[in-house]
Image: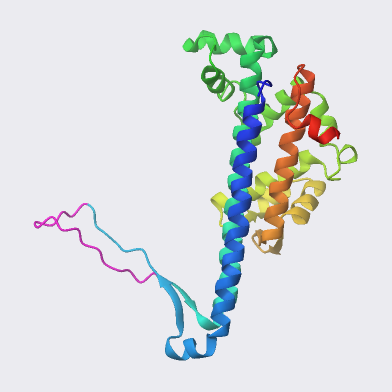
Protein backbone atom coordinates (compact mmCIF):
# COMPACT_ATOMS: atom_id res chain seq x y z
CA UNK A 1 0.00 0.00 0.00
CA UNK A 2 2.34 2.74 -1.27
CA UNK A 3 -0.37 5.41 -1.56
CA UNK A 4 -0.45 7.07 1.90
CA UNK A 5 -4.14 7.95 1.61
CA UNK A 6 -5.31 4.47 0.60
CA UNK A 7 -5.80 3.18 4.14
CA UNK A 8 -8.88 5.35 4.91
CA UNK A 9 -10.48 4.12 1.69
CA UNK A 10 -9.81 0.46 2.45
CA UNK A 11 -11.12 0.89 5.99
CA UNK A 12 -14.29 2.46 4.62
CA UNK A 13 -14.78 -0.19 1.94
CA UNK A 14 -14.49 -2.91 4.57
CA UNK A 15 -17.04 -1.15 6.77
CA UNK A 16 -19.46 -0.75 3.85
CA UNK A 17 -19.00 -4.38 2.82
CA UNK A 18 -19.89 -5.50 6.34
CA UNK A 19 -22.96 -3.25 6.45
CA UNK A 20 -24.07 -4.50 3.04
CA UNK A 21 -23.69 -8.09 4.23
CA UNK A 22 -25.72 -7.42 7.38
CA UNK A 23 -28.39 -5.72 5.27
CA UNK A 24 -28.94 -8.73 3.05
CA UNK A 25 -28.48 -11.42 5.71
CA UNK A 26 -31.20 -9.86 7.84
CA UNK A 27 -33.55 -9.54 4.85
CA UNK A 28 -32.89 -13.13 3.81
CA UNK A 29 -33.40 -14.51 7.32
CA UNK A 30 -36.57 -12.49 7.83
CA UNK A 31 -37.98 -13.91 4.59
CA UNK A 32 -37.15 -17.45 5.74
CA UNK A 33 -38.74 -16.88 9.15
CA UNK A 34 -41.86 -15.34 7.60
CA UNK A 35 -42.15 -18.19 5.10
CA UNK A 36 -41.97 -20.79 7.87
CA UNK A 37 -44.50 -18.86 9.90
CA UNK A 38 -46.95 -18.77 7.00
CA UNK A 39 -46.63 -22.52 6.40
CA UNK A 40 -47.77 -23.23 9.94
CA UNK A 41 -49.81 -20.10 10.49
CA UNK A 42 -53.25 -21.62 11.05
CA UNK A 43 -52.14 -24.29 13.54
CA UNK A 44 -49.80 -21.96 15.41
CA UNK A 45 -52.32 -19.13 15.59
CA UNK A 46 -54.93 -21.41 17.09
CA UNK A 47 -52.50 -22.71 19.69
CA UNK A 48 -51.05 -19.28 20.55
CA UNK A 49 -52.06 -16.01 18.82
CA UNK A 50 -48.87 -14.21 19.83
CA UNK A 51 -45.85 -15.22 17.74
CA UNK A 52 -43.29 -13.07 19.55
CA UNK A 53 -43.16 -10.77 22.54
CA UNK A 54 -40.54 -8.95 24.57
CA UNK A 55 -40.17 -6.17 27.10
CA UNK A 56 -37.47 -4.30 29.00
CA UNK A 57 -37.69 -4.87 32.74
CA UNK A 58 -37.59 -2.04 35.24
CA UNK A 59 -34.92 -1.89 37.94
CA UNK A 60 -34.79 0.86 40.53
CA UNK A 61 -31.01 1.09 40.75
CA UNK A 62 -31.07 3.60 43.60
CA UNK A 63 -32.98 1.23 45.90
CA UNK A 64 -30.42 -1.33 47.13
CA UNK A 65 -32.16 -4.28 48.84
CA UNK A 66 -30.82 -5.45 52.21
CA UNK A 67 -30.15 -8.91 50.73
CA UNK A 68 -28.31 -7.31 47.76
CA UNK A 69 -30.41 -9.26 45.25
CA UNK A 70 -31.33 -7.06 42.30
CA UNK A 71 -35.09 -6.67 41.72
CA UNK A 72 -36.68 -6.46 38.26
CA UNK A 73 -40.33 -5.99 37.45
CA UNK A 74 -42.35 -5.53 34.26
CA UNK A 75 -44.03 -2.34 33.11
CA UNK A 76 -47.11 -2.03 30.91
CA UNK A 77 -44.90 -1.55 27.82
CA UNK A 78 -44.49 -4.63 25.63
CA UNK A 79 -43.47 -5.40 22.07
CA UNK A 80 -45.75 -8.02 20.52
CA UNK A 81 -46.06 -9.62 17.09
CA UNK A 82 -49.32 -11.44 16.45
CA UNK A 83 -49.48 -14.15 13.81
CA UNK A 84 -51.96 -12.18 11.75
CA UNK A 85 -49.75 -9.05 11.78
CA UNK A 86 -46.41 -10.78 11.24
CA UNK A 87 -45.83 -9.65 7.64
CA UNK A 88 -46.46 -6.00 8.47
CA UNK A 89 -44.30 -6.27 11.59
CA UNK A 90 -41.41 -7.80 9.64
CA UNK A 91 -41.60 -4.99 7.07
CA UNK A 92 -41.44 -2.38 9.85
CA UNK A 93 -38.47 -4.10 11.49
CA UNK A 94 -36.60 -4.24 8.19
CA UNK A 95 -37.24 -0.54 7.56
CA UNK A 96 -35.80 0.32 10.97
CA UNK A 97 -32.73 -1.83 10.33
CA UNK A 98 -32.27 -0.34 6.86
CA UNK A 99 -32.35 3.18 8.30
CA UNK A 100 -29.83 2.20 10.94
CA UNK A 101 -27.47 0.69 8.34
CA UNK A 102 -27.61 3.76 6.10
CA UNK A 103 -26.97 6.04 9.09
CA UNK A 104 -23.98 3.87 10.01
CA UNK A 105 -22.67 4.17 6.45
CA UNK A 106 -23.01 7.95 6.77
CA UNK A 107 -21.06 8.02 10.04
CA UNK A 108 -18.33 5.85 8.52
CA UNK A 109 -18.22 8.15 5.48
CA UNK A 110 -17.48 11.08 7.78
CA UNK A 111 -14.57 9.11 9.23
CA UNK A 112 -13.32 8.37 5.71
CA UNK A 113 -13.40 12.08 4.79
CA UNK A 114 -11.56 13.23 7.91
CA UNK A 115 -8.99 10.46 7.75
CA UNK A 116 -8.29 10.97 4.04
CA UNK A 117 -7.42 14.63 4.66
CA UNK A 118 -5.40 13.75 7.78
CA UNK A 119 -3.37 11.07 5.99
CA UNK A 120 -2.73 13.42 3.06
CA UNK A 121 -1.50 16.21 5.35
CA UNK A 122 0.66 13.75 7.28
CA UNK A 123 2.38 12.56 4.10
CA UNK A 124 2.51 16.03 2.53
CA UNK A 125 2.38 18.70 5.27
CA UNK A 126 2.66 21.47 2.69
CA UNK A 127 -0.93 20.69 1.61
CA UNK A 128 -2.31 21.87 4.97
CA UNK A 129 -3.82 25.34 5.38
CA UNK A 130 -0.98 27.37 6.93
CA UNK A 131 -3.27 29.86 8.68
CA UNK A 132 -5.44 27.17 10.30
CA UNK A 133 -2.35 25.20 11.22
CA UNK A 134 -0.78 28.20 12.96
CA UNK A 135 -4.01 28.96 14.84
CA UNK A 136 -4.20 25.32 15.95
CA UNK A 137 -0.61 25.38 17.19
CA UNK A 138 -1.04 28.74 18.97
CA UNK A 139 -3.89 27.30 21.02
CA UNK A 140 -1.46 25.00 22.74
CA UNK A 141 -1.96 21.98 20.49
CA UNK A 142 1.45 22.21 18.87
CA UNK A 143 2.11 21.37 15.23
CA UNK A 144 0.89 17.92 14.16
CA UNK A 145 3.55 15.31 13.45
CA UNK A 146 2.01 11.84 13.72
CA UNK A 147 -1.06 10.56 11.85
CA UNK A 148 -2.96 10.68 15.14
CA UNK A 149 -1.98 14.35 15.56
CA UNK A 150 -3.30 15.15 12.08
CA UNK A 151 -6.53 13.23 12.75
CA UNK A 152 -7.13 15.39 15.83
CA UNK A 153 -6.24 18.53 13.89
CA UNK A 154 -8.70 18.00 11.01
CA UNK A 155 -11.49 17.18 13.49
CA UNK A 156 -11.03 20.45 15.40
CA UNK A 157 -13.98 22.81 15.69
CA UNK A 158 -11.89 25.63 14.27
CA UNK A 159 -10.51 23.55 11.41
CA UNK A 160 -12.94 21.31 9.51
CA UNK A 161 -15.59 19.99 11.88
CA UNK A 162 -18.87 21.70 11.11
CA UNK A 163 -22.52 21.29 10.18
CA UNK A 164 -23.12 18.56 7.58
CA UNK A 165 -19.34 18.33 6.95
CA UNK A 166 -19.60 21.41 4.72
CA UNK A 167 -16.25 22.89 5.82
CA UNK A 168 -14.49 19.58 5.32
CA UNK A 169 -15.95 18.97 1.87
CA UNK A 170 -15.10 22.51 0.76
CA UNK A 171 -11.50 21.89 1.80
CA UNK A 172 -11.42 18.57 -0.05
CA UNK A 173 -12.67 20.32 -3.20
CA UNK A 174 -9.91 22.88 -2.70
CA UNK A 175 -7.32 20.12 -2.37
CA UNK A 176 -8.66 18.31 -5.45
CA UNK A 177 -10.81 20.45 -7.79
CA UNK A 178 -11.68 17.31 -9.80
CA UNK A 179 -13.99 16.27 -6.95
CA UNK A 180 -16.46 19.05 -7.74
CA UNK A 181 -16.46 18.08 -11.39
CA UNK A 182 -17.31 14.45 -10.60
CA UNK A 183 -20.05 15.58 -8.21
CA UNK A 184 -21.88 17.13 -11.16
CA UNK A 185 -24.60 14.83 -12.50
CA UNK A 186 -23.40 15.38 -16.06
CA UNK A 187 -19.90 14.19 -15.15
CA UNK A 188 -20.62 10.90 -13.36
CA UNK A 189 -22.22 7.59 -14.30
CA UNK A 190 -24.78 7.84 -11.46
CA UNK A 191 -26.44 10.80 -13.18
CA UNK A 192 -27.10 12.45 -9.84
CA UNK A 193 -25.66 15.61 -8.35
CA UNK A 194 -23.64 14.20 -5.46
CA UNK A 195 -23.78 17.41 -3.44
CA UNK A 196 -27.58 17.22 -3.60
CA UNK A 197 -27.49 13.51 -2.83
CA UNK A 198 -25.28 14.06 0.22
CA UNK A 199 -27.66 16.75 1.49
CA UNK A 200 -30.52 14.25 1.14
CA UNK A 201 -28.46 11.52 2.84
CA UNK A 202 -27.72 13.94 5.67
CA UNK A 203 -31.44 14.44 6.23
CA UNK A 204 -31.97 10.68 6.13
CA UNK A 205 -29.27 10.11 8.72
CA UNK A 206 -30.67 12.91 10.94
CA UNK A 207 -34.19 11.48 10.70
CA UNK A 208 -32.99 7.96 11.51
CA UNK A 209 -31.01 9.17 14.53
CA UNK A 210 -33.21 11.88 16.00
CA UNK A 211 -36.83 11.60 14.85
CA UNK A 212 -37.76 7.97 14.24
CA UNK A 213 -37.41 8.23 10.45
CA UNK A 214 -39.27 11.54 10.06
CA UNK A 215 -37.73 14.37 8.04
CA UNK A 216 -39.65 17.18 9.67
CA UNK A 217 -41.47 19.73 7.53
CA UNK A 218 -39.19 22.59 8.54
CA UNK A 219 -36.13 20.59 7.46
CA UNK A 220 -37.72 19.59 4.15
CA UNK A 221 -38.47 23.26 3.41
CA UNK A 222 -34.81 24.17 3.93
CA UNK A 223 -33.89 21.90 1.00
CA UNK A 224 -33.99 23.22 -2.54
CA UNK A 225 -36.53 21.67 -4.90
CA UNK A 226 -33.71 19.73 -6.53
CA UNK A 227 -32.53 18.33 -3.19
CA UNK A 228 -36.10 17.44 -2.23
CA UNK A 229 -36.45 15.54 -5.51
CA UNK A 230 -33.25 13.60 -4.79
CA UNK A 231 -34.44 12.83 -1.25
CA UNK A 232 -37.69 11.33 -2.55
CA UNK A 233 -35.97 9.51 -5.41
CA UNK A 234 -33.19 7.87 -3.39
CA UNK A 235 -34.76 7.57 0.07
CA UNK A 236 -38.19 5.96 -0.19
CA UNK A 237 -40.93 7.41 1.97
CA UNK A 238 -44.32 9.10 2.11
CA UNK A 239 -45.51 12.61 2.82
CA UNK A 240 -47.27 13.22 6.13
CA UNK A 241 -48.66 16.29 7.94
CA UNK A 242 -45.42 16.38 9.95
CA UNK A 243 -43.01 16.05 7.00
CA UNK A 244 -41.55 13.18 5.01
CA UNK A 245 -41.59 9.75 6.66
CA UNK A 246 -38.85 7.42 5.47
CA UNK A 247 -39.83 3.84 4.58
CA UNK A 248 -36.50 2.57 3.41
CA UNK A 249 -36.65 -0.86 1.80
CA UNK A 250 -33.58 -3.06 1.38
CA UNK A 251 -33.15 -2.05 -2.26
CA UNK A 252 -33.06 1.67 -1.38
CA UNK A 253 -30.65 1.05 1.47
CA UNK A 254 -28.38 -1.02 -0.78
CA UNK A 255 -28.41 1.71 -3.41
CA UNK A 256 -27.42 4.27 -0.77
CA UNK A 257 -24.44 2.10 0.24
CA UNK A 258 -23.41 1.87 -3.41
CA UNK A 259 -23.51 5.65 -3.83
CA UNK A 260 -21.45 6.11 -0.66
CA UNK A 261 -18.97 3.57 -2.06
CA UNK A 262 -18.69 5.33 -5.43
CA UNK A 263 -18.54 8.82 -3.92
CA UNK A 264 -15.72 7.77 -1.59
CA UNK A 265 -13.72 6.29 -4.44
CA UNK A 266 -14.19 9.45 -6.55
CA UNK A 267 -12.76 11.53 -3.70
CA UNK A 268 -9.90 9.11 -3.12
CA UNK A 269 -9.03 9.01 -6.80
CA UNK A 270 -9.17 12.79 -7.20
CA UNK A 271 -7.03 13.44 -4.11
CA UNK A 272 -4.52 10.79 -5.17
CA UNK A 273 -4.05 12.07 -8.72
CA UNK A 274 -3.92 15.72 -7.63
CA UNK A 275 -1.10 14.91 -5.20
CA UNK A 276 0.94 12.57 -7.39
CA UNK A 277 -0.24 9.24 -5.98
CA UNK A 278 -1.57 6.19 -7.78
CA UNK A 279 -5.22 5.62 -6.80
CA UNK A 280 -6.24 2.26 -5.39
CA UNK A 281 -7.62 -0.12 -8.04
CA UNK A 282 -6.44 2.17 -10.85
CA UNK A 283 -4.92 -0.68 -12.85
CA UNK A 284 -8.01 -2.87 -12.39
CA UNK A 285 -10.41 -0.18 -13.59
CA UNK A 286 -8.28 0.83 -16.59
CA UNK A 287 -8.31 -2.68 -18.02
Residue 253 in the image: state x and y as whole percent: 67, 54
- Residue 79, quarter of picture: bottom left
Q: Quadrant of the N terminus?
A: top right
Residue at the spot 46% in from the left edge and 85% down from the top edge: 49
Q: Nearer the viewer, residue 2 or 74?
A: 2
Q: Is residue 72 magenta?
A: yes
Residue 258 in the image: state x and y as whole percent: 72, 47
Q: Nearer the viewer, residue 3 or 211?
A: 3
- Observer able to see residue 58: yes
Label the magenta part by its dominant secondary structure. Answer: loop
Q: Please, is residue 277 above or below residue 217 in the view? A: above
Extreme residue toward the right, this view: 186
Q: Please, is residue 109 above or below residue 280 in the view? A: below
Q: Please, is residue 57 above or below residue 129 in the view? A: below
Residue 240 in the image: state x and y as whole percent: 68, 64
Residue at the spot 57% in from the left edge and 82% down from the top edge: 38
* Residue segment shown in magenta: 62-77
Extreme residue toward the left, this view: 66
Q: Is residue 269 magenta?
A: no
- Observer able to see residue 206: no
- Residue 75, quarter of picture: bottom left
Residue 17 in the image: state x and y as whole percent: 63, 46
Q: Nearer the viewer, residue 54 or 167?
A: 54
Residue at the spot 61% in from the left edge and 63% down from the top edge: 27
Q: Please, is residue 241 above or below residue 196 in the view? A: below
Amino acid sequence: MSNPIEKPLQNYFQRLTTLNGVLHVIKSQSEIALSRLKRHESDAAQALPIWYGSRVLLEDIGDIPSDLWRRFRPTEHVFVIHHEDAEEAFADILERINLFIVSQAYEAYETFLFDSVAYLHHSQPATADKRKLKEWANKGNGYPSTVEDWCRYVRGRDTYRGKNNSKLLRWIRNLAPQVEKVENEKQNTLRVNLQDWFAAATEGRHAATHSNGLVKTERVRLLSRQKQAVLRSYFAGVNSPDGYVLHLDTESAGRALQVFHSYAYAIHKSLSIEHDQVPAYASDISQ
